[in-house]
Amino acid sequence: MKQYNTRAIMASLLICGFVGMFSETALNIAISNLMDVFHISAATAQWLTTGFLLTLGILMPMTGLLLQWFTTRQLFVVSLASSIIGTLIAALAFNFEMLIVARVLQAAGMGLLIPLMFNTILVVYPPEKRGAAMGFVGLVIMFAPAIGPTVAGLLIAYFTWHYIFWLSLPFLVIGLLVGLKNLENVTEVTKPRIDLLSVILSTIGFGGVVFGFSKAGEGGEGWSGPIVVASIAIGLAAIALFALRQIFMREPIMNLRVFKYPMFVVGLLMVLSCMMIILSSMIILPMYLQNGMKLSAFSAGLMLLPGSALNGLMSPRMGRLFDKYGPKWLVIPGLVIVALMLWFFSGITPASSIAFIVALHIGLMVGISMVWMPSQTNGLNQLPPELYPHGTAVMNTLQQVAGAIGTAIAISILTSGMEKYLHNSKAPTENTEMANAMTFGSQNVFMFAMIVTLIGLAMAFFIRRVVVSRAMNPMH
């Protein structure tokens, strides 16, 4: 096996990934601030997140193909150029349209970088060291979005929201320079034929589903709105046609043969359930802390910091334990912890102590770190090397879709719960009743997340360690 300077390669990819993920969530705290500055409604401001997710949803399915068309260095440079230009435009933005363009460029950069990172790890690390390497990716994917809101809350309190981007810019430039010096071309460029119809179907399919669910999650017209129904229906039909076409093509854009590998499928389902649990609870919890318990944005951000930081720090540790003991002894206890924490969460009230909520959040995040990376690494380990780009493309694409679905379901459960509570209330306009309604809606969301966890737990009993003797043979 060829020797690579794995430390330097990882350093450059992780720095850039960290900054990209950081700016993805940092802007969430600034949304209400931006609504005042640009005089826009919440539904319009939501496009800063929806636009980001949409770009990822459209780009991710293509990454398997792009990884075979361009060298590692070419993709790295393009992804960083896109991120740097996007971040610079965002830092200079003086109107909402500029900011939207910036977000799309940032998302395009991230959409190329994350699959490139996974694929590079699969190529440069032998299977017995992959868990630890994937753990560091977990640290980035979890820790960066976690500190985003806290740092952004501080920057907004003392400066302006522009500084979120000015802070990110130098790190992206450093990451680019480190990468240019150390990153090697690790994949083989095979230039398979590009099937235009597949590209169109994939764009309409994944774009439509992500857009439909994001629109449903914005509130307003809810699930029965014509735009929501049409985009989800058209999206699902296009995905079905896309999948059919991939099965019969000699050189598919997204090779669905990855679904023939049972541990890949189990790993994928685990990762998707984690994504839904995290996004549904991570969107509702800050809202609950601010509206139900009347805490400031900065205090809410600080409360969520210990759990998220610990999750990031635990990830490499879990990766090493996975390398040593395999997935089962991490994943099953992890899901049991997550289910317990969510059960306690479903009973929180405005009277619950801050320490109790912080402790529950820490437990939840530790449980997730035991499930996410071990399942993902174990699943990808079962694939032969020629399917690595496709496996990472499938996982990353479906994660975006699961994220959009989880967010939308969480918001709609919250709103319907609040409406139901206020409908039966004697004084629906009073502040205490509004807080109680928020509590009732949030409790329902945590119950939903717990049900997803229990389904995940049932699947976890099928997970078993992949013995990677085949994957070591690239001719397989």
Image (cartoon, rainbow, N blue to C red):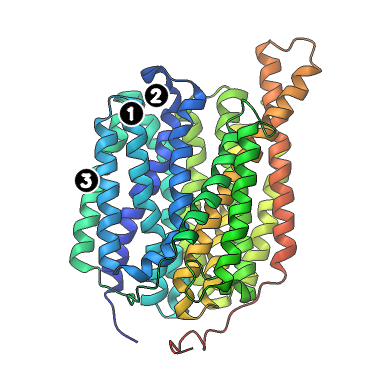
User: CB atoms at circles 2 and 3 under 8 Å apart?
Assistant: no
Give neighbour class at mark 1: few <14, some 14-19, many 20+ (Cα, 10 Å). Answer: many
Residue at point 37% right, 71% down?
A: 68
Residue 345 location, x and y as percent? 68, 40
User: CB atoms at circles 1 and 2 under 8 Å apart?
Assistant: yes
Residue 348 shows up from this direction:
no
Q: How many marks?
A: 3
Residue 429 shows up from this direction:
yes
Which of the 4 image quadrants contains residue 367? bottom right
The CA span between labels 1 and 3 is: 17 Å
* Closer to the camera in the image, 454 or 94: 94
Residue placed under numbered mark 1 in the picture = 161
Residue 127 placement, left or right of 341 = left
Give the residue type that dot 1 points to: Trp
* Closer to the camera in the image, 145 or 45: 45
Which structural element holds mark 1? loop
Give the answer, above or below, for where 82 lies relative to 222. below
Give the answer, above or below, for where 96 lies relative to 467. above
Residue at point 41% right, 22% down?
A: 33
Tell which circle, 1 or 2, labels the residue nearer the N-terminal end: 2
Residue 431 location, x and y as percent? 65, 13
Residue 12's label in the rendered image is: none
Give neighbour class at mark 2: few <14, some 14-19, many 20+ (Cα, 10 Å). Answer: some
* Closer to the camera in the image, 364 or 202: 202
Residue 88 location, x and y as percent? 24, 39
The CA span between labels 2 and 3 is: 23 Å
Give the residue type that dot 2 points to: Leu
Residue placed under numbered mark 3 in the picture = 170
Residue placed under numbered mark 2 in the picture = 34
Tell which circle, 1 or 3, labels the residue nearer the N-terminal end: 1
